[in-house]
Image: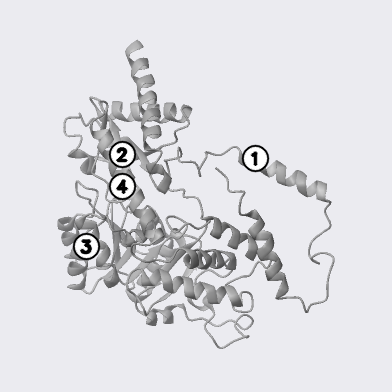
Amino acid sequence: MFDHDHLDLLTAALGRLEEGFASLPSVEATPTEPSVSPEALSGALHAVAERLQDNFPYPHPLYAGQMLKPPHPVARLAYALTQWLNPNNHALDGGRATSAMEKEAVAALASLFGWKVHLGHLCGGGTLANLEALWVARELHPGRVVLASDQAHYTHRRVCGVLGVPFRTVASDDRGRLDLEALEKELARGDVGTVVVSLGTTGLGAVDPLEDVLRRARAREVRVHLDAAYGGFFTLAAGLGEDARRAFDAAREADSIVIDPHKHGLQPYGCGCVLFRDPAVGRVYRHESPYTYFSSEALHLGEISLECSRPGAAAAALWATQRVLPYVPGGAFAASLDSCLDTARRLHQALEVRPGFIPLMAPELDIVVWAVAAGTASEASRLAARVFREAAAEDLHLALTTVPRSPATDALRDMGWDRDEVTCLRSCLMKPEHGRWLEAILTRLDRAFAVVQEAGERA
């Protein structure tokens, strides 16, 4: 499960890095390090290793729960290598080389959406990236409302609260996508400044109908912000369905986009990115610092970022990954995304023929959600929690998600709705190797369900 084979490459690369500083006087140890014996270092590392055992096995294919994807070896090694310098990409003074890498890496991300001209940078993750996008939206449309569907990530409502921006929720349709009729009614109120569109909702993996949203928003001069934190990289996938493909192809028309390389981009946490189609929004960031931006007249990334200190190691890791796995249709990176799509569809199909399970909508990306068959929503929720626990006992780690009545209604039309939501089982099949492990996953799921079923009969 853990990669040991590439550690010697790190030692060799560290030697190459050291060559660049050979002119400096030698020192026995880094001056800022208090002296610690090798025995103490070893003891501390082994203690960390023992504490880390109290985790789910995130890199293993039997972990099919939350959005946790192992970084690629090149990303881990490049991140670790860069830590010997520990650059700060706030200003060129603290991260000259890694700032250049960040600009190149961000340009590669922008190219996914057809943007050759853009403004953007890396940040700690989707939450901060969305905050920046909605902060810019607030500055451009002060006092105007932000809309997002009831399946959009909760961070949008929270961010709007932090920013003091009015926020309203739009209903979703029976596929978990932003409902266009409900959107039209909200836009008609005349107070909307920004619509948030999700290319892959966190709970269901649903892709909002971006093309239709853009047409309605543009008619009223409303900004469109695209939350593609989870799903953005799927624009490279060849196997998207027709509706999803149309939405991804329209992404170039959005005003701002968020994408998280620490999800499908094979990066360590935290590595998010915010992009703006119009570089002129940089005027919103304008500020003066008497002590930071003095070494160069070139753009310092801190001048277009709300964050100050940011790890240059994250930029180096992403840049290195793009070097070995470029974003090209039909390439190895794109093929790995198509593998995830295929596995999700195969799991959905397998669940359709299994008594006791009811899959909801067919997956648009690589998230599969299914309910446990029961007479009522309350009973289905209770059984889902039981299956979740029994599956973990089989070393199969799933997730739970709460689905409101509307997106679940079609699949669960025969169920008694004694509550307005139902707890379902959920899998994020983010690892290409999930395809080879699908039978093992299903075998363990079947055993877990059999235990729950038997316990119910005894009761």
Q: Earlier in the sequence, mark 2 or mark 3?
A: 3
- N-term-proximal mark, 1 vs 4: 1
Q: Residue furthest top?
A: 458
Task: Please name the residue that numbered disc 2 is placed on.
Answer: 347
Is the Cβ of the residue at disc 2 closer than 8 Å to that at disc 1? no
Gap in angstroms between the C-alphas marked 4 and 3: 19 Å
Q: Residue 372 got which mark?
A: none
Q: Which residue is mark 1?
A: 51
Q: Which residue sits at x=39%, y=80%? A: 279
Q: Does 319 appear above or below 377?
A: below
Q: Indicate which disc residue 246 carries.
A: 3
Tell me which numbered mark, 4 or 2, is placed earlier along the sequence. 4
Report helix, strand or loop for mark 2.
helix
CA gap between label 1 and label 4 equals 36 Å
Q: Position of residue 454 (x, y in %)?
A: 35, 15
Q: Residue at x 51, y 81 (%)?
A: 287
Decide: few, some or many residues near mark 1? Use Cα within 10 Å; few <14, some 14-19, many ≥20. few
**Residue 61 in picture, x, y percent from top left:** 45, 41
Label 4 or label 3, whichever comes before in sequence order: 3
* Crowd class of label 2 (few under 14; some 14 to 19; many from 20; radius 10 Å): many
